Image: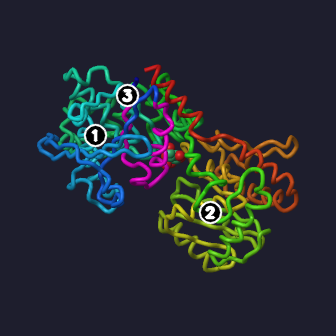
Amino acid sequence: MKKVLFVASECVPFIKTGGLADVVGSLPKYIDKDRYDVRVMVPKYKVIPDEFKQQMVYVTHFYMELSWRNQYVGILEMEYAGVTFYFIDNEFYFSGPSPYGYIHEDIEKFAFFSKAVLSSLPVIDFRPDIIHCHDWQTGLIPVYLNVMFQGNPFFRGIKTIMTIHNLKFQGIYDKKTIMDTTGIPAMYFTPDKLEAYGDANYLKGGIVYADYVTTVSNTYAEEIKMPFYGERLDGLMRARSNRLSGIVNGIDYSEYDPEHDPLIKYPYSSKNFRREKCKNKKALQKELGLDVNEKTFMIGLVSRLTDQKGLDLVDYVIEQICAEDTQLVVLGTGERRYENLFRHFAWKYGNRVSANIFYSNERSHRIYASCDAFLMPSLFEPCGLSQLMSLRYGTVPIVRETGGLKDTVEPYNEYESTGTGFSFANYNAHEMLDTIRYAKHIYYNKKREWNKLIDRGMAKDFSWNNSARRYEELYDRM
Ligand code: GLC
């Protein structure tokens, strides 16, 4: 039995700011329980809902040195959906209104967390064969393991995997502060180790010291070896390319299931979507105060409202997107300029644009179930999960060909009648607009073709079944 420990800064259903939480919350459930003992460690944030905090059981606590500080480390445990979760407790670090705040605080918070994770293992007597780290917040784990824990026989031979969900976020701060915060000796702050461009860089440390590096799609694994997507670490990515590969994410097919989704009004399947799906559209139109008409082409956009998601393209041509024969439904929060952009157009075209500037899981399910198309014109996209949810709900994705979007959405070919969505290559607003108009043309004028697109999309399998096997193969190889 191989033991694997997942470590991350967020995890569904306890705490979520983005797709990372979905992956960390669902992948462990799909790893074969007969062959692997997978457990998960996350911070015990104050903002975790009470219903979960009440179920956590206190295990033990100790004090840990973090450079010149001496800090409390509490450990709590909880069984959820067949997986053991550990929560690292420290009220000084984890009491904020959200998991992340000011970078100078986060830098210390996650140095503490990373060292606390390693320090906890002998205390709870769980010696993983593999520690599977996710994103910059856990980048110091492979570093600490090498620098400070190797001397202890308990830790000898533990392997590490660093999974990059988004290379844009690296955990960068000035070297002096990081040396002081982490207690890691000065000799490790060189360009072949923790230093990048004069600063200290947590994710770089993780990539350098991990035994293996993965990212969340094949295309993104290739893209980040080039300057455009490499976020100034493309050289390192090329250097590590024999220990770097992509494994595309899945989604939780029990949670995202149009046939048995308690959050939508009219459940449907790949057999009866032609009749049933539009009932959800009408219900959503009513709920959002849009014109009620099951024929109107409805585009969904559920996203963090940030530059990464290609929203400046939408900004350029939003007037043309919001044509009279189209409805646009937006859900999410993020940069002020995009929040206000959508608010403005919802005000201007109240009968056909709906701006939901907040996050609601329930509403997201209804949007996936109700819309005809789903827009995701990302500048870069390590994997992307919403396009997978859309495919599952028979909502046709319109995407830019980058990262996971390229790997999971097959472009429609009118002549061969293949493909599951619409896509465009260049980061260009009018290319996007043309693609949206082309999709709309097929929807309005070639309805049978459109429905066949849905058939093919719903027939695809983006459950974890495939990708969990790939992770298992990787665990075995190590
Ligand atoms: C990040 C990426 C997204 C990916 C998710 C889960 O949020 O931006 O593309 O799907 O992580 O891996």
Quadrant for the N terminus, please: top left
Residue in the picture at 80% in, 68% down: 295
Q: Earlier in the sequence, mark 3 or mark 2?
A: 3
Image coordinates of residue 231 in percent, x first then y, are 46, 42
Residue 159 location (% of width, % of height): 36, 25
Q: Nearer the viewer, mark 1 or mark 2?
A: 2
Label 2 neighbour load within 10 Å: few <14, some 14-19, many 20+: many
- For mark 3, what is the residue? 3
Residue 21: x percent and y percent? 45, 49
Residue type highlighted by circle 2: Ile
Span colored in magenta: 4-33
Q: Which callout, 1 or 3, points at the residue further toward the start of the chain?
A: 3
Image disc number at residue 379: none
Quarter location, residue 239: top left
Amino acid at pointer 1 = Ser
Secondary structure beneath label 2: loop
Image spot of residue 251 (x, y percent) = 56, 45
